[in-house]
Amino acid sequence: MRKIIIIGSGPAGHTAGIYTARAGFSPLLFEGWMAGGVAPGGQLTTTGTVENYPGFPDGVGGSELTMMMRAQSVNAGVDILTETVESVDFSKRPFTVKTSETEEKAEAVIIATGAIAKRMHVPHEEDFWQRGISACAVCDGALPVFRDQPLVVIGGGDTAMEEAMHLSKFGSKIYIVHRRDELRASKAMQDRVFANPKIEILWSTTLVDVKGDNALSHVVLKDLKTDKEYDHEAKGLFYAIGHTPNTSFLDGAVKTDNTGYIITKSGSTITSVPGVFAAGDVQDKQFRQAITSAGTGCMAAIEAEKYLLENPL
Amino acid sequence: MRKIIIIGSGPAGHTAGIYTARAGFSPLLFEGWMAGGVAPGGQLTTTGTVENYPGFPDGVGGSELTMMMRAQSVNAGVDILTETVESVDFSKRPFTVKTSETEEKAEAVIIATGAIAKRMHVPHEEDFWQRGISACAVCDGALPVFRDQPLVVIGGGDTAMEEAMHLSKFGSKIYIVHRRDELRASKAMQDRVFANPKIEILWSTTLVDVKGDNALSHVVLKDLKTDKEYDHEAKGLFYAIGHTPNTSFLDGAVKTDNTGYIITKSGSTITSVPGVFAAGDVQDKQFRQAITSAGTGCMAAIEAEKYLLENPL
């Protein structure tokens, strides 16, 4: 039996760990083992250089940053298990959390399991991941490798339009590749994109592969009306086709929206179950940055401490 | 004329700077000059070692962390002016921001001027600031110097009670010094404090001075009913008498609550004036941590970018 269990090991999970450990709760943190298809540390481990996490003037490697956060958790007194949580029982306190090897109870739980950017998994995608391919234009758009180069955005929603507008400040030309002949994005966003001379939409087109030497140089596109495939120059490829929050293990134990994101009380990490808190990308489809995730991890820790103070078992 | 002006130079201001600069906005940041009585960098510069900012396993100096954030801003392309903003005109866009030397206009403004913890300014307070005296139990309570030692909390509200409960996990005995003979704190919080054998309330008592050699060893208290002064052992002194947000220069240009904090839309940094955003402690009286401030600085940058996209001048 623990006071607090934390599920997840990205910036939100470890920040919650650091804060709850320093508050004297001896928390247990399940960091997962290839949970959501990524290593402990989450999406940040799939990132090359992080230039926008404040405190590192020359940037820091994504994996390096997660390792330092993990070390800080350990130093603060967090117990870490490298196991993936498979199910929970939040129907009564203490809450129960289960992996294939361990079952543990806690008075409060912080869920920080993150989300995974959707990718198309074309044949050579892994070869160029973070060597031209990214799922975050806000994070990576400003990198020198993309300056004055042709860039491709995959998607047709508001996020894809916003990312294309963002990238148009850096690239020479932005191509939005969209499989249909109309966009899901709002009319207002479409108008802005249509008015931007640097952006061109490749309608009824899909990505079938990527090419390059050390870094991405071309995407292979397919015209869905003619079935013709062709190479198209692109130094950057940005997926903007959404994210999948890692919430399936919850099996409805806390309320989620229709896309699986945990619903939290606005401006807080409080979920539909008193004593269960959610931090990081698992409850955030708007900002999705390492620094915002870490911020909400801290909020969850402070809110959990307050909850335990007011609701002793 | 700028796209974005940022006012403030703590974690929120510099994170907003890093993000807006990387988004190509060439922001101007007014870091202030002894604004709010502290150096550029804000409250963090008055902190010794920061153990809870994620990414620094062995802790980092408060001043060092602010210098690194500033360097990162500069590297990202933020223009910094070491001047204190004295007045603003948000009645029409572009907005106007004035110091004693400079007047500049911008299409969007991010306010991140922070808050200052209230202190009693007893005679020898400066000698022991961060050598036993703190205004943040959550930040500093876990430091080794306070373990199993007598600690004093000044205040009578919910925050003071929460800080005393938090400190009771570390100190040998916690004394709440309160000038009146009843508490402002909620009944529920009072009950918890009264039930905690490690906490004692010194009623109708006030702090008049502090003593020690290199570090704090005693507080000098005064019994307000007898006017008698006496030394009381204390290795830690925690002010929990509130904060003052740095918003007087706004002169009502954005909506604030009755204690001067900027009101933001819940879960966002949007203020009462479209195009003006607020991040960090100037709009947060609940969490007030470096990492939560930095998180909201990022949010402000992303929300400002979206606003400028949707509201071109």
Image (cartoon, coloured by chain):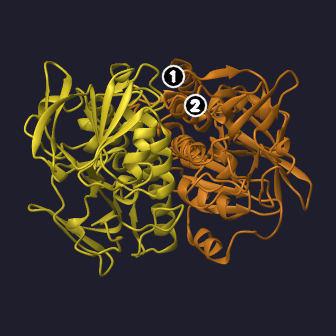
Chain colours: A yellow, B orange
Using a 10 Å C-alpha cutoff, classify the residue at mark 1 as few (fewer than 14 neighbours), some (14 to 19) or many (20 or more).
Answer: many
* Camera-nearest residue between A290 and B24: B24
* Residue wearing tag 1: B76
Using a 10 Å C-alpha cutoff, classify the residue at mark 2 as few (fewer than 14 neighbours), some (14 to 19) or many (20 or more).
Answer: many
Residue A234 in which image quadrant: top left
Give the residue displayed 67% in from the left and 28% down from the top: B29
Q: CA distance from mark 1 to mark 2?
A: 8 Å
Please state the horizontal and vertical placement of residue A49, each as a whole percent of the image: 32, 26
Q: Quadrant of the C terminus of chain A?
A: bottom left
Does residue B62 appear anywhere in the picture?
A: yes
Please state the horizontal and vertical placement of residue A1, each as a whole percent of the image: 27, 67
Note whether A187 is above or below B298 in the view shown.
below
Please state the horizontal and vertical placement of residue B88, each as a whole percent of the image: 83, 39
Q: Is residue A65 left or right of residue A293?
A: left
* Residue wearing tag 2: B17
Circle 2: residue type = Gly
* Camera-nearest residue between B253 and A7: B253
> Which chain does tag 2 point to?
B
Note whether B108 is above or below B225 in the view shown.
above
Please state the horizontal and vertical placement of residue A170, each as a whole percent of the image: 43, 26
Residue lying farthest front? Answer: A226
Does residue A21 appear anywhere in the picture?
A: no
Residue B40 in which image quadrant: top right
